[in-house]
């Protein structure tokens, strides 16, 4: 028998020896290992690379696991080292020295029909459902049984075997699905004309399913230093938003494979300025398994895969514009080589895009959206909000005008700059030093040209330093306008006249790409570029103000039109109304997709990898299993004695330790001594039940919301004779949780239920004075986790820029060794 080998070129086959017990009877391979889990230094946040030495907290010594790279361990002074974000400290002498070279082999499973052994992944085996009372049949036996008509195909799939198309639909998923289908149909017809055949004879993509698998309300809290610095100027303490997670699947060989994932943040009318009516593209990720691997029709050279992915993004832009949103922000930040944003372990043949390639990818789809009338104008963060930007017209720039998004680059950078400014002021006060630091935190030379930020208001200083940081890489921070903004007040023109210039004059702007004051451009490129002002328009209020030359800016003084622009040159056009933001999509709660790190942790902890097609199929099937069965155990535990993985519902767990488990063999052997009692784990979920109907699913969601409301009521209720019987039940749960000695670690089902409710409430809560116990603590813990993740992403982005710096230096050295010649100016995509 022959089978294709995973990861090998198409057509490569491996002979299968039926007598070789060490060979998988499905793929022909023997021992296969997983990618080791990604480890990040607790101190510096950098990834600990393969085969590097690191230090970690010993097992069962602390509640929080910590990792330190060799450099941070050596640089830490003193006998104790602190765990980041906690009050816990451990002795350096107690840390275990390890090497990041662990390997874990893929699991095997034996067929109960023929006795053959296959990899669990090859056999699409769900170890979370392993039951001694259920038989497992390998793929060969299943196919043989179907061919001999000894088995019948499944007519109605149980809850544990549901597919992507069984996920609930919503308004936006139907909208995007219809757009994808129409685009593929048009491409198929065009390709048929090119090949002079019927559309039915042309190959095209099939089996695509798109769903929204997470749609919840969240709250972006202003960072502590930023809020403290600008709360008197009106800085909000938080920005509520809706998070949507969109997944695209394609059915391959009878299995749905997850290909494309989007994390979106939608800030509606209930959100305070400056985030109101903005959308932030938080994360985007894909794996290169789309079929067929051909170019789209028309000779553009764009892959059919790219056409579909662009259609999803353009369709989403169209949808949110119809819902009343006015702007979208995109941070074009590619991951470092080897890192993952959402989907764990990409295939080796999939290259990590450079920053310029990623920007062009976004610009291509945005040009398409502009041609369709969805996007009105494209700019960037620096040009829109900073003094010197080609679109900036407001008399006084303010940091409170910049949209403030969860996970974006500049909020974290502003927090760091405020810390440096505070330290600089403290040092200046102690030493009498009145100098200042650069944006990178280095001492500013006294002879440095340009603006000094050692004096002036705190807002002027932070805007100046942010401008230094962002200005050099402004092309990576894309601002997408879905409606027409006024060039002076930045308000979007709704249901009124729009006065626009038909041909704005040219303007010279700085175009050099820099980071930490060092140019990323190659020698000979011009640092200044002449661009035509892409857009100039006024709302009715600003037009009247400019015409009268009277306003709050001073009697007889207008805000000022740019050079070469006169009021009589402006033409008028009626702008349509901008609707209020509405979300017609139901709430969809999924714990594993609450953050992209939560989903990445789920994949890393269970080895749901996407580096080969066989693993991508199995991983996608397991993702669908967790989506359809959210109460199923997500992570498998590991025996603390032998190190083997313990299947869900098996083994024994300590009632007091946070992470101590024994498999059944080690427990019954009596060789392991443990000071605390152990309890047997029980499986409490039945995936063999039939799928939930839509009314049952809606009733379940409504019951969950009623439970959350009851939890808040019971926490604040001090009426001993409260007429609500459910209120008294929740109060009893509170009392039990306080007095229980077994706790969650010991397997107490009441404590586990209470803890789950508290965590679910903390994820949804937006109240600043919430009465629910531990709500503030859980939210603060989540905020710290998010802050660490943001720091890791920002550090990765800065590391990428430093790599570009090094490449620019190497290129400059090579050019110095060559004869002088003409260097073309750097191409730049202008606003359009």
Image (cartoon, rainbow, N blue to C red):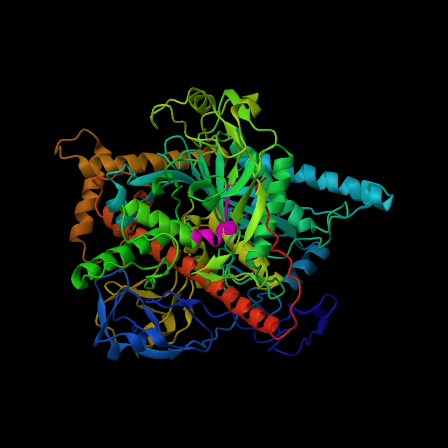
Q: Tell me the quadrant of the picture where the N terminus can be found.
A: bottom right
Q: Is residue 477 magenta?
A: yes
Is residue 495 visible to the viewer in this orientation of the structure?
yes
Is residue 337 visible to the viewer in this orientation of the structure?
no
Picture coordinates of residue 207 (x, y %)? 66, 46
Residue that appears at 33% across and 27% down: 554
Q: Is residue 507 magenta?
A: no
Q: In the displayed structure, would residue 223 be above or below residue 369?
A: below
Residue that appears at 52% across and 29% down: 537
Horizontal placement of 194 versus 237: left or right? Answer: right
784 or 138, nearer to the observer? 784
Residue that appears at 30% across and 45% down: 459
For the magenta stretch, what is the residue range? 470-479
Picture coordinates of residue 588 (x, y %)? 44, 40
5 or 424, nearer to the observer? 424
Horizontal placement of 705 versus 574: left or right? Answer: left
Picture coordinates of residue 124 (x, y %)? 57, 60
Q: Tell me the quadrant of the picture where the C terminus can be found.
A: top right
């Amino acid at each position: 028998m022959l089978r294709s080998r995973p990861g090998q070129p198409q057509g490569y086959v491996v002979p299968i020896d039926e007598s070789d017990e060490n060979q998988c009877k499905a793929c022909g391979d023997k021992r296969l290992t997983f990618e080791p889990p990604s480890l990040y230094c607790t101190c510096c946040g950098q990834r600990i690379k393969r085969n590097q030495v690191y230090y970690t907290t010993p097992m069962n010594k602390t509640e929080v696991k910590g990792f330190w790279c060799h450099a941070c361990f050596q640089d830490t002074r003193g006998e104790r080292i602190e765990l980041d974000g906690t009050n816990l400290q451990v002795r350096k002498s107690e840390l275990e020295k390890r090497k990041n070279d662990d390997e874990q082999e893929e699991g095997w499973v034996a067929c109960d029909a023929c006795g053959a052994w296959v990899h669990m992944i090859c056999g699409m085996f769900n170890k979370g459902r392993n039951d001694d009372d259920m038989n497992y049949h390998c793929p060969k036996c299943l196919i043989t049984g179907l061919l001999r008509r000894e088995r019948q195909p499944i007519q109605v799939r149980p809850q544990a075997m549901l597919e992507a198309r069984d996920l609930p639909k919503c308004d936006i998923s139907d909208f995007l699905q219809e757009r994808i289908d129409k685009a593929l149909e048009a491409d198929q017809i065009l390709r048929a004309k090119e090949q002079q055949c019927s559309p039915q004879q042309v190959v095209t993509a099939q089996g695509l399913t798109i769903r929204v698998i997470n749609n919840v309300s969240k709250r972006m809290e202003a960072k502590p230093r930023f809020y403290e610095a600008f709360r008197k100027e009106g800085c909000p303490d938080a920005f509520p938003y809706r998070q949507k997670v969109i997944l695209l699947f394609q059915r391959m060989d009878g299995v749905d494979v997850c290909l494309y994932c989007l994390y979106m943040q939608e800030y509606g009318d209930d959100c305070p300025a400056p985030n109101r009516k903005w959308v932030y593209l938080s994360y985007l990720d894909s794996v290169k398994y789309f079929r067929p691997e051909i170019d789209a029709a028309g000779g553009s050279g764009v892959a059919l895969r790219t056409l579909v992915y662009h259609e999803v993004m353009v369709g989403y832009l169209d949808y949110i514009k119809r819902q009343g949103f006015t702007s979208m922000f995109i941070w074009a930040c590619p991951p470092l080589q080897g890192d993952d944003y959402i989907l764990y372990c990409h295939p080796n043949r999939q290259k990590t895009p450079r920053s310029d390639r990623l920007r062009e990818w976004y610009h291509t789809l945005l040009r398409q959206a502009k041609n369709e009338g969805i996007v009105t104008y494209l700019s960037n963060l620096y040009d829109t909000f900073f003094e010197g930007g080609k679109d900036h017209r407001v008399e006084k720039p303010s940091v409170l005008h910049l949209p403030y998004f969860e996970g974006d680059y500049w909020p974290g950078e502003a927090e760091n700059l405020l810390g440096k400014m505070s330290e600089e002021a403290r040092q200046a006060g102690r030493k009498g030093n009145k100098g200042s630091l650069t944006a990178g935190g280095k001492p500013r030379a006294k002879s440095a040209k340009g603006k000094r930020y050692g004096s002036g208001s705190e807002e002027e200083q932070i805007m100046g330093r942010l401008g230094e940081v962002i200005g050099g890489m402004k092309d990576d921070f894309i601002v997408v306008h879905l409606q027409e903004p006024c060039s002076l007040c930045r308000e979007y023109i709704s249901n009124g006249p729009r006065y626009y210039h038909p041909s704005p004059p040219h303007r010279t702007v700085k175009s050099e790409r820099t980071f930490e004051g060092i140019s990323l451009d190659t020698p000979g490129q011009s640092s200044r570029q002449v661009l035509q002002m892409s857009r100039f328009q006024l709302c009715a209020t600003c037009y009247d103000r400019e015409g009268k030359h009277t306003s709050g800016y001073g009697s007889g003084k207008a805000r000022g039109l740019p050079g070469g622009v006169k009021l009589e040159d402006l033409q008028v056009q009626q702008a349509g109304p901008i609707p209020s933001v509405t979300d017609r999509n139901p709430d969809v709660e999924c714990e594993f997709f609450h953050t992209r790190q939560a989903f990445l942790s789920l994949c890393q902890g269970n080895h749901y990898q996407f580096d080969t097609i066989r693993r991508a199929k199995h991983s996608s099937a397991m993702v669908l299993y967790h989506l359809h069965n959210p109460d199923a155990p997500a992570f498998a535990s590991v025996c603390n004695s032998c190190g083997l993985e313990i299947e869900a519902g098996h083994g024994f767990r300590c009632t007091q330790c946070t992470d101590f488990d024994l498999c059944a063999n080690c427990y019954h052997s009596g060789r392991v001594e443990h000071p605390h009692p152990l309890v047997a784990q029980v499986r409490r979920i039945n995936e063999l039940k039939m799928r939930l109907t839509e009314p049952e699913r809606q009733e379940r969601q409504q019951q969950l919301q009623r439970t959350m409301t009851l939890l808040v009521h019971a926490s604040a209720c001090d009426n001993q004779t409260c007429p609500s019987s459910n209120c008294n039940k929740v109060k009893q749960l509170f009392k039990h949780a306080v007095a229980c000695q077994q706790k969650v670690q010991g397997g107490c089902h009441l404590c586990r239920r209470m803890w789950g409710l508290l965590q679910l409430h903390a994820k949804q809560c937006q109240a600043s004075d919430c009465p629910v116990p531990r709500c503030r603590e859980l939210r603060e813990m989540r905020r710290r986790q998010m802050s660490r993740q943001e720091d890791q992403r920002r550090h990765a982005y800065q590391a990428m820029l430093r790599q570009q710096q090094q490449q620019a230096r190497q290129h400059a050295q090579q050019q110095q060794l060559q004869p002088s010649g003409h260097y073309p100016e750097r191409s730049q995509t202008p606003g359009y």
